């Protein structure tokens, strides 16, 4: 499918790593000194990382990509702990991604993992 997804300009990227924590979906990693998109599945194309690159190396383009998969993202996110789960849920909320948010919350329920965003 054709959809929006990030692109990293490898010539501009200096591998500083500032974008990494700003992708709660875990789509970015520094590999061989450059930021790389590790899987199309993990990039929701909403651009949370964009403003965190001091060199303007990250842009959004439209291209053929695998569909974003909320359940795969959640499986990755829950391993990183409560604060990352919370950041991800807030990211979905702030971009009005109600369908993905529901999938994420359902995933937590199914796995018996506490939802750090719900009042308790
Ligand atoms: S913030 Fe920009 S320069 Fe730094 S690693 Fe990420 S893409 Fe590369």
Image (tube, rainbow, N blue to C red):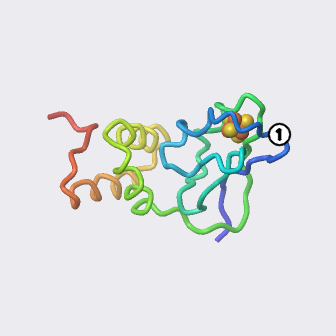
Q: Residue at x 65, y 67 (%)?
A: 65
Provide the residue designation for mark 1. 12
Locate residue 114 relative to residue 88 in the image: left or right.
left
Q: Is residue 93 above or below residue 44?
A: above
Q: Residue at x 21, y 55 (%)?
A: 109
Toward the viewer: 71 or 4? 71
Q: Tell me where residue 48 appears, x and y as whole percent.
A: 57, 39
Q: Residue furthest right?
A: 11
In the picture, the quarter occupied by the N terminus is bottom right
Q: Is residue 39 above or below residue 55?
A: below
Q: Residue furthest top?
A: 54
- Label 1 crowding class (10 Å Cα cut-off): few <14, some 14-19, many 20+? few
The answer to which quarter of the image holds residue 106 is bottom left
The answer to which quarter of the image holds residue 40 is bottom right
Q: Tell me where residue 73 appears, x and y as whole percent.
A: 44, 57
Q: Tell me where residue 111 appears, x and y as whole percent.
A: 22, 59
Q: Tell me where residue 43 appears, x and y as whole percent.
A: 57, 54
Label 1 lies in ligand 1 vicinity (Cβ under 8 Å)? yes
Total label count?
1
- Name the quadrant where ligand 1 sits: top right
Mark 1 residue element = loop
Q: Residue at x 73, y 28 (%)?
A: 54
Q: Residue at x 23, y 38 (%)?
A: 118
In the picture, the quarter occupied by the C terminus is top left
Locate residue 75 relative to residue 52 in the image: left or right.
left
Locate residue 108 relative to residue 62 in the image: left or right.
left
Q: Is residue 119 above or below residue 38?
A: above
């Amino acid at each position: 499918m054709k959809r929006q997804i990030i692109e990293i300009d490898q010539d501009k990227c200096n591998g500083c790593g500032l974008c990494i924590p700003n992708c709660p979906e875990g789509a970015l990693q520094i590999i061989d000194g450059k930021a790389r998109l590790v899987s199309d599945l993990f990039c929701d194309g909403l651009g949370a990382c964009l403003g965190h690159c001091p060199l303007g190396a990250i842009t959004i383009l439209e291209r053929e990509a695998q569909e974003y998969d909320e359940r795969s993202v959640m499986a990755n996110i829950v391993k990183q702990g409560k604060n990352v789960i919370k950041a991800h849920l807030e990211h979905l909320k702030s971009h009005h991604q109600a369908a993905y948010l529901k999938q994420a919350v359902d995933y937590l329920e199914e796995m018996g993992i506490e939802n750090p965003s719900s009042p308790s």
